[in-house]
Image (cartoon, coloured by chain):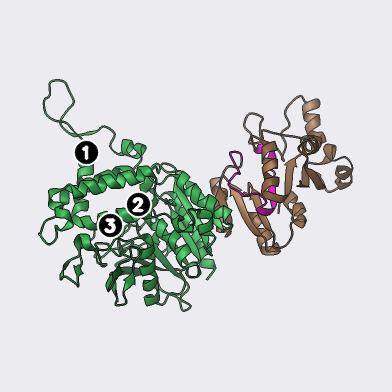
Chain colours: A brown, B green
Amino acid sequence: MRLDLSHIQRWIAPGSRVLDLGCGDGVFLEFLRDQRQVRGTGLEIDQDYITAAISRGLNVVEQNMDESLANFPDQSFDTVVLALALQAVNYPDRVLEEMLRIGREGIVTFPNFGHWRCRLMLGLGGRMPVSGFMPYTWYNTPNIHFCTVKDFENLCKEKGIRILARDVVGNTKRQPMLSNRWPNLFATTAIYHITR
Amino acid sequence: MNHPEESHSVGLVTPLVAHFEEPLGLTCGRELPAYQLVYETYGELNAQRSNAVLICHALSGNHHAAGYHSPNDRKPGWWNECIGPGKPIDTSRFFVVCLNNLGGCHGSTGPSSINPATGKPWGRDFPPMRTRDWVQSQARLADYLGIDCWAAVIGGSLGGMQAMRWSLEFPQRIRHCIVIAAALKLSAQNLAFNEVARQAIESDPDFLGGDYQTHGAVPARGLALARMIGHITYLSDDAMANKFGRDLRSGSLGRGEANDAEFQVQSYLRHQGSQFSGNFDANTYILMTRALDYFDLALEYGNDPVAAFRHARCSFLVISFSTDWRFSPERSREIVNALIAADRPVTYAEIEAKEGHDAFLMPIPRYLDVFRAYMLRVGDCY
């Protein structure tokens, strides 16, 4: 399983209801269903992902979370997950607000643009960062709203969102110490457990 | 095109008839004393009787959903693209049942059947049917076949409405509900098209107030016109443009050429209309359009589709098509949103397709992929 997903599964209670925004091929919801008896629903817009998620026996709704999530009632899920999709939506702040309207808790993961490699490429190289983790060129990328660990925490403060827990993924096995101590510099992926 | 001997066809099939002697109370308050239903089955019912799938037909459909009645048939059943070995509704896994609904004109009791009370065809006296009545009669067919619970009830258009009604009328007897290109109720525009179709039939002098059969008449022109109107609404603007454009079948639009020019689309529609009027009964067409008009899933649940769907116990698959303007994706999203709000398991796909409402009968790759993927799940929960 993708590293950020293996980190967040421990925050999801067995038997709970989970809405996965941008559920991809459904591998995470499948894991939660089979290992945690979770009742899950996925939202997705990619056709191939939708078919793959249906093949896993999951409930998946073709819907663009960027347009509206108003059809999901208040507090109808225990947890709403937004994994590596925050940077790809038009209105990240609105999506965050909607997540915590629909779910009691939210889990957000995103690539940290404050990572030292990004800073190096931009600061010294003078070019937008391109890496194995962010493989897109600036003009052809689904990622339109990059932010850093600091930016995200500031937004949460502004919106009155409480951070229950923070976790980070560094880019090598030797770095967990560094990325926990200085996440904005050493985390490649930031992981947040949030609530109102 | 699949032929009877081809591996992905269910091959040659023979319609069966079930007779019911117990009267059926109808939504209109009247009672059908005795009736028969004609149906077809494909595939084998398993020992647990848990792999049965019910197909509900749309406005002008019938029990012949797949395969061929004879090796000389030019066309297979109406949903042959989706039913057969290896197809989305895989007959090597499922026992598929499709019937001609009550009020139909292909073998089930309907307006052209003999009314036992008068010894003459029912004609206009045949009781009006509601989707609910069809579901009740389908449940009796399930009893007759020894099927306690359908693995899935599946339908497109008016068939999708029956599938939804099943989920509310018999929540314990349906595990999956598959609703394709349907709606919670018709829009005013849809009601209007149906009214024009009925007026076309009723204003045909041969209609004789619906009594044409006893007088040996056929309101063929009215029925053909009704079908032509309907047919236009089942296609998209683009589909018609691609298929016909402004191509001429005869004549010319050139200056000084006095002959009347005829467009391809004209002759196509006339052909569709006349073919249909030779195979369909006018009173049945009126009855079917009325059933469509009167369908309103949530009417008896305080007009609240969320409250209605709370009675359902099954999982849902909802599919719509991008250019379907008769039952637009917006109507399907209303179904999906009500299911979400009612906390029912739902999967939804909006298929990019240029064919309009008719897309639900077409072999569109993504449509078949989604359908097949979901049916795997239906099969896994035996």
Residue A175, by quadrant, is: top right
Q: Magenta residues?
A: A66-88
- Residue receiving disc 1: B266
Q: Quadrant of the N terminus of chain B?
A: bottom left
| Front of the two marks 3 and 1 | 3
Q: Is residue B351 magenta?
A: no
Q: Give the Cα distance between marks 3 and 2.
A: 10 Å
* Residue at 39%, 45% in the rendered image: B187
In percent of width and height, residue A187 lies at 81, 41
Please tell me whether residue B235 is drawn above or below residue B35 in the rendered image.
Answer: above
In percent of width and height, residue B75 lies at 27, 57
Foreground of the two, B229 or B278: B229
* Circle 3/circle 1 CB separation < 8 Å: no
Find numbered disc 3 in the image and state the secondary structure of the residue it sits on: helix
Question: Disc 3 sits on a residue from what chain?
Answer: B
* Circle 3/circle 2 CB separation < 8 Å: no
Q: What's the amino acid at mark 3?
A: Leu
- Residue receiving disc 3: B287
To the question of a shared chain for discs 1 and 2, the answer is yes
Q: Is residue B375 left or right of residue A33?
A: left
